[in-house]
Image (cartoon, rainbow, N blue to C red):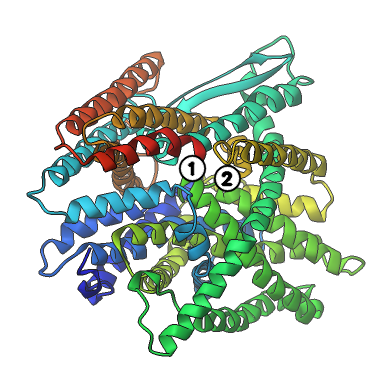
């Protein structure tokens, strides 16, 4: 936009609105994450709420709305810290969550996540073809909501988002009421063993699939085939007998205790390869950031869309942050049987956080670009961080009298800081993609996200303590019938314990690493022989192996639907706008489910237990109703979106040619 530099962005009212949304969404996410191991993305709901509130004020604009969603997006990612910290209570090391210690772990890790990902913007956002589905969706919401209300395309686009959102939210309501199934899944014997297959009846995942495209969809489907049609039948073949009574338990237990660790090995190798591949662009990004800083210092005008936080400030913040981090690590060891090693352990841990932080920020940013922040397998990154820190600490303390329990606790505490880096870097680049599409100023977004981190860090400790006091965690002494499962925290604790008592099955991780190496070779051959027309992203394959099948199956289905829609749209009289209309329809599916997720989380938290919306009982009919309604909803949304696309005014021939090229290559080449 021509007058973009005059638009206000980082305003006091925007900070206040974003901060309030962050407080509420973070609390809701902490509860849901502890209860079922899932959190919901907050960027898009925050954008919708922001537009509704700021419309009441004069001078509001798309960039100010973007700052609000950037601040609030911290709630959807920073709250994932609950995947690690509760482990300290579960193993009996903490009796509660000390406010300042917990808040500082979140704040310092989150701030480092922003700083480490600043130089990645040029490498992974402006200089990359990664799809960033949630970043694109948030940008579409902001642009359409702020557009000219008299423009025909804006009117139809906004209507498409709203209708898609209503349909998606309504299905979410039916699923919450148990009137329709939320997923279909089944276990069955296969190739001398057993496996499971199914799908989450989530319209948001269909939308995500549409936005990420066929390349990522096929790669994830490849991961599903490897895990559920090769590995799972193989690993269960020696357990499954003639009876099918315990088939479901056998399959689910084997997947959780074995297959996911194979997936972790695949993702670890893929992550290292990804890091090697993006090293060049990252170095160029750092060089460009330094060059931009020098130009600004010399008084040379730099376009606002290229202004990051100056690199000298970034590096200073990173180094200065190591001081309070070092103090936290040292204080954690005080009055324990490892205190005599405090100085050395603190030193190597600070160095580990410094080095691992940059590595993990790069990998998480890349994963967010592939499939979105809310669908990234962030817990797998946590497992890798726990394994790496545990091996380092175990090597250093070998031969000493340090107890395994103290070392496990210290490992989890160190990994929690690294995990904070991972969660926010996973989100920051998604936000910066949104900013790029709406012409925002990067440094203002980066500052806004730090503000969001601070808001979120203040609410996480009391909510964690409230959950511990009110419900307790599964397996703890005195935990009641409504104890929270905290599944990821249990997994992280088990991994750390397995390393120090030598019970972790490394063969599974090595097998996954071997699979990852083969996938990397296939990907390189494909890209080299087809001139990058086809590829098989190794990280996406690893995601397909690691994530539950209910999630991974729906993304490729959504990708296929989006692919065929785009091919149809490329032959319309206004192809660019028709393709964009499909993007808006997919965005609506994500928006509706996200907003309902917020409302439902609030209802559950208020009720302090099971959702009061569950007024029906699941049976065979709810599954049938769910499948029929789900398919009907998809058909309705895409039919209506296609109708709106047909009615758009004609475009120039050049635009039509560009759209035809895009529809024929975008979904299958990036």
Q: As drawn, which residue projects farthest toward the top?
A: 242
Q: In the image, which disc is placed on residue 487?
A: 2
Residue 630 image position (x, y, % from top left): 33, 24
Q: Is residue 636 left or right of residue 119?
A: left
Observer-nearest residue: 587 or 488? 587
Q: How many marks?
A: 2
Q: Residue at x 23, y 41 (%)?
A: 161
The residue beneath circle 1 is 36
Answer with the quarter of the image where residue 430 lies.
bottom left
Q: Looking at the image, can residue 589 be seen?
A: no
Q: Is residue 208 visible?
A: yes
136 relative to 200 in the view: left or right? left
Residue 55 or residue 347, whichever sits in front: 55
Position in image of residue 461 (x %, y %): 47, 66
Given residues 131 and 21, the one toward you in this image is 131
Quadrant placement of the N terminus: bottom left
Q: Quadrant of residue 315?
A: bottom right
Q: Looking at the picture, how far across and down is residue 15, in whole percent?
A: 28, 72
Q: Which type of secondary structure does the marked residue at label 2 adopt? A: helix
Name, please, the residue furthest toward the bottom: 298
Of all residues shown, which one is farthest toward the front?
Answer: 653
């Amino acid at each position: 936009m021509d007058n973009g530099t005059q638009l206000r962005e980082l305003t006091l009212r925007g900070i206040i609105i974003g901060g309030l949304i962050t407080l509420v969404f973070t609390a809701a996410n902490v509860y849901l994450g502890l209860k079922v191991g899932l959190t919901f993305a907050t960027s898009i709901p925050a954008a919708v709420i922001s537009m509704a509130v700021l419309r009441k004020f004069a001078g509001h604009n798309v960039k100010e709305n973007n700052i609000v969603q950037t601040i609030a997006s911290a709630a959807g990612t920073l709250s994932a810290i609950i995947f690690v910290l509760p482990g300290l209570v579960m193993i009996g090391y903490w009796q509660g969550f000390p406010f300042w210690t917990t808040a500082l772990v979140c704040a310092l890790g989150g701030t480092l996540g922003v700083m480490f990902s600043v130089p990645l913007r040029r490498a992974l956002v402006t200089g990359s073809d990664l799809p960033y589905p949630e970043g694109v969706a948030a940008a579409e919401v902001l642009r359409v909501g702020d557009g000219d209300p008299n423009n025909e395309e804006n009117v139809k686009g906004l209507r498409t988002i709203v209708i898609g959102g209503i349909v998606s939210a309504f299905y979410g309501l039916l699923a919450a009421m148990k009137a329709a199934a939320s997923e279909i899944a089944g276990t069955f014997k296969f190739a001398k063993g057993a496996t499971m297959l199914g799908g989450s009846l989530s319209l948001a995942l269909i939308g995500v699939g549409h936005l990420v495209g066929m390349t990522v969809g096929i790669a994830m489907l490849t991961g599903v085939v490897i895990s559920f049609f090769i590995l799972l039948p193989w690993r269960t073949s020696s357990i499954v007998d003639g009876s099918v009574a315990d088939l479901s338990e056998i399959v689910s237990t084997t997947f959780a205790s074995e297959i996911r660790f194979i997936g972790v090995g695949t993702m670890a190798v893929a992550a290292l390869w990804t890091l090697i591949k993006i090293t060049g662009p990252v170095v160029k990004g750092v060089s460009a950031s330094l060059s931009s800083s020098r130009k600004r210092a010399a008084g040379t005008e730099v376009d606002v869309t290229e202004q990051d936080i100056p690199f000298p400030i970034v590096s200073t913040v990173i180094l200065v942050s190591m001081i309070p981090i070092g103090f936290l690590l040292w204080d954690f060891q005080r009055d324990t049987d490892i205190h005599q090693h405090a100085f050395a352990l603190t030193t190597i841990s600070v160095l580990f956080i410094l080095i691992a932080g940059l590595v993990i920020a790069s990998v998480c940013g890349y994963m967010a670009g592939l499939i979105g922040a809310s669908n990234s397998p962030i817990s797998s990154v946590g497992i890798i961080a726990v394994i790496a820190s545990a091996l380092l600490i175990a090597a250093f303390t070998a031969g000493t009298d340090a107890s395994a329990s103290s070392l496990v606790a210290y490992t989890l505490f160190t990994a929690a800081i690294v995990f904070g880096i991972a969660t926010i870097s996973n989100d920051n680049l998604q936000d910066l993609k949104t900013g790029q599409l709406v012409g925002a100023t990067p440094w203002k977004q980066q500052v806004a996200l730090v503000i969001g981190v601070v808001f979120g860090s203040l609410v996480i400790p009391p909510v964690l303590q409230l959950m511990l006091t009110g419900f307790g965690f599964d397996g703890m002494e005195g935990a009641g019938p409504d104890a929270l499962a905290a599944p990821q925290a249990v997994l992280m604790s088990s991994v750390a314990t397995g390393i120090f008592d030598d019970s972790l099955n490394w063969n599974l991780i090595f097998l996954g690493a071997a699979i990852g190496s083969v996938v990397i070779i296939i990907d390189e051959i494909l890209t080299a022989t087809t001139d990058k027309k086809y590829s098989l992203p190794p990280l996406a394959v690893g995601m397909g192996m690691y994530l539950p099948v209910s999630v991974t199956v729906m993304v490729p289905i959504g990708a296929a639907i989006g692919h065929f829609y785009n091919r149809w749209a490329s032959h319309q009289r206004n192809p660019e706008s028709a393709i964009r209309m499909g993007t808006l329809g997919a965005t609506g599916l994500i928006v509706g489910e996200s907003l309902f997720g917020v409302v439902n989380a609030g209802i559950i938290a208020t009720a302090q237990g099971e959702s009061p919306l569950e007024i029906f009982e699941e049976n065979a009919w709810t599954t049938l109703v769910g499948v029929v309604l789900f398919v009907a909803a998809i058909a309705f949304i895409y039919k209506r979106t296609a109708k709106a696309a047909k009615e758009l005014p004609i475009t120039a021939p050049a635009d039509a040619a560009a759209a035809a090229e895009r529809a024929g290559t975008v979904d299958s080449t990036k």
